[in-house]
Amino acid sequence: MRSMLICLLFGCASAFAADTPTEPEPSAAQRMEAGRNAIEAKKWSVAITEFKAAVKEEPRNADAHNLLAYSFRKQAKPDLAKAFEHYRTALKLNPDHKGAHEYIGEAYLMDKKPAEAEKHLADLERICGNKTCEEYVDLAGAIAQYKLQQ
């Protein structure tokens, strides 16, 4: 009788533990949304955490790599090495990724390499088929501003 009581107690305890609900990990899509919200709020460390998790779950997601790179570049102390690493990954996954071309061009300006930025501007003209798409206009403006400051 005593052993039965012990079994019942331990059985109930383990059954209770097995039934304890756990929170599922957020999906890559949820991480991307949280990362974009963090970018809007300029919470770069939060954005980096979210995009790293999204990249871990979906390593072939060019958007996740692009936005992770963007977050590394925009934080108070930019990490250009990490930014370039993830921009290059995004462009390897999707050579026509307009956002990655724009942002890596801006990173090259931060790194004082305007000729590299201009190569990505030319890529944007080819990808967009014109000089009026938003990414081309933004990078062209950043290059012009850079040249005025030199």
Image: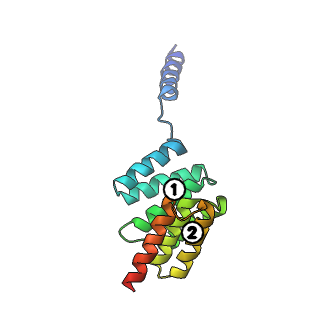
Taking the view exactly as shown, the residue that stands out farthest to the top is 1
Mark 2 and mark 1 lie on one chain; the one further toward the N terminus is 1
Question: For the point 57% across and 63% down, which residue is it?
Answer: 130
Question: For the point 53% across and 22% down, which residue is it?
Answer: 11
Q: Nearer the viewer, mark 2 or mark 1?
A: 2
Instruction: Give the percent coordinates (x, y) of residue 123.
Output: 61, 68
3D distance between C-alphas at marks 2 and 1: 13 Å
Corner quadrant of residue 145: bottom left
Corner quadrant of residue 86: bottom right
Instruction: Give the percent coordinates (x, y) of residue 102.
Output: 51, 66
Residue type for callout 2: Glu
| Label 2 sits on residue | 85
Task: Please tell me which residue lies in front, 97 or 72.
Answer: 97
Task: Please tell me which residue lies in front, 112 or 42.
Answer: 112
| Label 1 sits on residue | 52
Q: Is residue 33 above or below residue 94?
A: above
Task: Please tell me which residue lies in front, 65 or 9.
Answer: 65
Residue type for callout 1: Lys
